[in-house]
Structure formats: structure tokens, C-alpha cells
Image: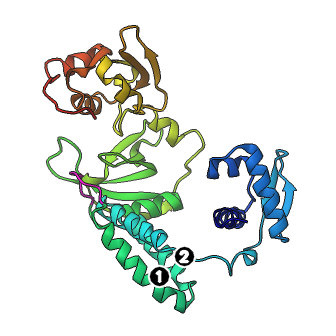
């Protein structure tokens, strides 16, 4: 067996341990980017080399392969680039005001390192430091709103516990912040981060969006609420182009990209429900249904005069007169 195939077999065995329900043929195809026939050969090799492999069928009739942790424990090792990837992720989360998620990754890193034998850890630390120095420029540049310390921690705790959240919030147009009690339903991530919630005084009303950078303070309440199954965060998010939305703007959006910009535009996912229509002159029409005209304007400006808004009319008027022709590059 070649070294490369041995590495793949070990990675496959690690997958079979990590997935509690076991791995399927499609899981192997997706992970290694191989054909089903190759995946079948890899799984047969797994059965031969790891005699503890448990093969069974799930409720949907799919074949699954599982391994107990002891089967690969002594063969596994932590690589410097894997450890560096964790540190980079922690740094990116911290710089993006994801302080709670960053702290969770720090705890995960500590647990992983605690399992590494001391002799291996010393050698790993040396390579890890050198790799981090080489990757020191890895960062997410650009401006971003800042969220008050502790706010995201409180939001995360309230979401998991399904409890009300007491916030001090300064809405647009308000002179000073005021206290609110809300039922948090989820978080939308984007240039700005929005907390999706219902207000306690209007639990039967519509969904509200609260900018996390406008939340002065937040604390989880002792009182819980029923989230219910009628609200779907993914479906709610898909109604927006960015993160903010309102029902009045929701509808069909149609953009036409000039022939010289069509290739770039095809590489973008403007919206999960988008469709592309190639035109005889080489231009590209993009269609989707969403709200959020202001965030659409921010994005469309970057394309200069290489994009034209065909619909809706209010959006077309918003960008009219702001389509520049002197941008040296496309997004």
C-alpha cells in the first residue's frame, strides 16, 4: 500500500469513528471527491485492515460503516497545520466579534492538546509556532460593527436554553436606549449581525430584527418560552438579500450583467434561489426573490455600470445615477 493510500485509509477510519451513526458510501464520495466505485474499494479496505469495523443498515436502507474509538486512537496524531487552522479560526472569530464562539474553540483546542502525549506535544509546538508565523497575515480585513462584550454570550445562552432575553437596545431614530424583553429565535450573520426575535409585548406579532451592535447589554432571563415549530430560520433568512429585510420590499429581483461581467457574475451566489439566463449578446440575467433593497444597492455599486437593474422599479431608481464606469476591476 502506498503512503498516500495509507493516509486516505487512516482518514477514512477517523471518519468512521467520528460519525456516531457511521459513514455511508455517499459520505466517502463527498469527502474524497472520488467515484462510487473507488469509494467502495476504500470501504472494503477499511473492513480488511480494521477488523473492528461494524457494517449495518440504517432505517432508510443505507449501508453504514462504524469503528470504535480504540481502533484508531494509537494511530492518530495532531498535525501542526491542523492546530494552526484552529488558531486562525479563533483569531477570525475574535476579530469578527464572535467572542463566545472563539472561546468555545479555545476550549476545544485545550482538550485536543490534553490528549497529545507530551513527547509529541513538544515537537508539535515548535512546528506549530513556525507555521503560525508564516500564516501571520491571515485575517479578515475591512470595517465591521463592534458588539459589546458579553452580548453574544448572553444571546447564545438564551437561544440554547429557549429563555427570554432582557436587552437594553437603541433602535434607529431613538434618542436613547430602552429596555426590552424578547424571545430570541436565531442570529443572521453578515456585514451586520442581527438577532431574530419576537418582542414579549407582541408574541403573536411579526418577527423583529435587532442589530447586535446596537444592543448595549443583554442578560438571559429565568423565564422560558415555547419556540414552536412554525418558524424556520433558514427560510426566513432566504427572504433577504443580505441580513436585513422587510415584507414591503419582498418580491422578484432581476439584474442584467454586461457581457464583460457575465463570467464574474456567474461565479457569485447572490441568493440561494437564484437562476441564470444566458442572453444572445453574451450578457447574463440573474433572477431571485428577496428583500433588502439597501443592501442590494451596496453590492450593486461595486459592479459599476456593468450591471443593470430590470426589476423591481424602486430598486432601479435607487441605483440610477450611481453606476460608475471607472472601476479598474470587478468584484
Residue sticking out furthest to the bottom = 119
Q: Which residue occupies 58% across, 45% down?
A: 228
Magenta residue span: 139-147
Given contact means CB atoms under 8 Å apart, are the residues at marks 1 and 2 in contact? yes
- x, y percent for residue 204: 48, 38
Q: Is residue 164 left or right of residue 213?
A: right
Is 10 in front, or is 240? 10
Q: Which residue occupies 16% across, 30% down?
A: 327
Q: Which mark is residue 78?
A: 2
Q: Is residue 296 visible?
A: yes
User: Which quadrant: the N terminus?
Assistant: bottom right
- x, y percent for residue 263: 37, 26
Task: Give the alpha-carbon distance from disc 1 to disc 2, as whole Å.
Answer: 8 Å
Q: Is residue 291 visible?
A: no
- Precedes in sequence: disc 1 or disc 2: 2
Residue hosting label 1: 124
Scheme by which the image is coloured: rainbow
Amino acid at each position: 500500500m502506498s503512503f498516500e493510500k495509507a493516509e486516505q485509509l487512516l482518514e477514512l477510519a477517523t471518519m468512521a469513528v467520528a460519525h456516531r451513526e457511521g459513514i455511508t458510501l455517499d459520505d466517502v464520495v463527498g469527502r474524497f471527491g472520488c467515484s462510487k466505485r473507488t469509494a467502495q474499494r476504500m470501504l472494503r479496505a477499511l473492513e480488511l485492515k480494521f477488523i473492528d469495523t461494524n457494517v449495518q443498515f440504517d432505517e432508510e436502507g443505507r449501508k453504514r460503516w462504524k469503528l470504535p474509538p480504540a481502533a484508531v486512537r494509537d494511530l492518530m496524531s495532531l498535525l501542526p497545520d491542523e492546530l494552526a487552522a484552529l488558531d486562525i479560526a479563533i483569531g477570525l472569530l475574535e476579530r469578527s466579534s464572535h467572542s463566545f464562539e472563539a472561546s468555545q474553540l479555545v476550549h476545544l483546542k485545550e482538550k485536543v492538546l490534553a490528549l497529545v502525549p507530551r513527547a509529541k506535544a513538544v515537537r508539535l509546538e515548535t512546528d506549530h509556532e513556525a507555521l503560525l508565523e508564516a500564516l501571520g497575515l491571515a485575517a479578515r480585513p475591512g470595517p465591521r460593527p463592534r458588539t459589546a462584550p458579553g452580548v453574544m454570550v448572553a444571546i447564545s445562552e438564551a437561544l440554547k436554553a429557549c429563555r427570554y432575553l432582557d436587552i437594553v437596545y437603541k433602535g434607529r431614530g431613538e434618542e436613547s436606549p430602552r429596555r426590552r424583553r424578547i424571545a430570541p429565535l436565531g442570529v443572521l450573520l453578515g456585514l451586520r449581525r442581527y438577532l431574530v426575535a419576537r418582542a414579549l409585548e407582541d408574541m403573536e406579532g411579526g418577527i423583529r430584527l435587532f442589530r447586535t451592535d446596537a444592543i448595549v447589554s443583554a442578560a438571559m432571563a429565568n423565564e422560558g418560552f415555547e419556540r414552536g415549530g412554525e418558524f424556520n430560520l433558514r427560510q426566513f433568512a432566504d427572504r433577504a438579500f443580505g441580513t436585513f429585510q422587510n415584507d414591503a420590499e419582498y418580491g422578484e429581483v432581476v439584474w442584467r450583467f454586461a457581457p464583460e461581467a457575465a463570467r464574474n457574475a456567474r461565479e457569485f451566489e447572490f441568493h440561494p434561489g437564484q437562476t441564470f439566463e444566458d442572453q444572445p449578446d453574451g450578457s447574463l440575467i440573474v433572477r431571485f426573490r428577496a428583500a433588502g433593497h439597501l443592501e442590494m444597492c451596496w453590492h450593486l455599486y461595486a459592479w459599476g455600470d456593468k450591471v443593470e437593474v430590470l426589476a423591481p422599479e424602486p430598486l432601479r431608481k435607487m441605483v440610477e445615477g450611481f453606476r460608475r464606469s471607472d472601476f479598474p476591476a470587478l468584484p
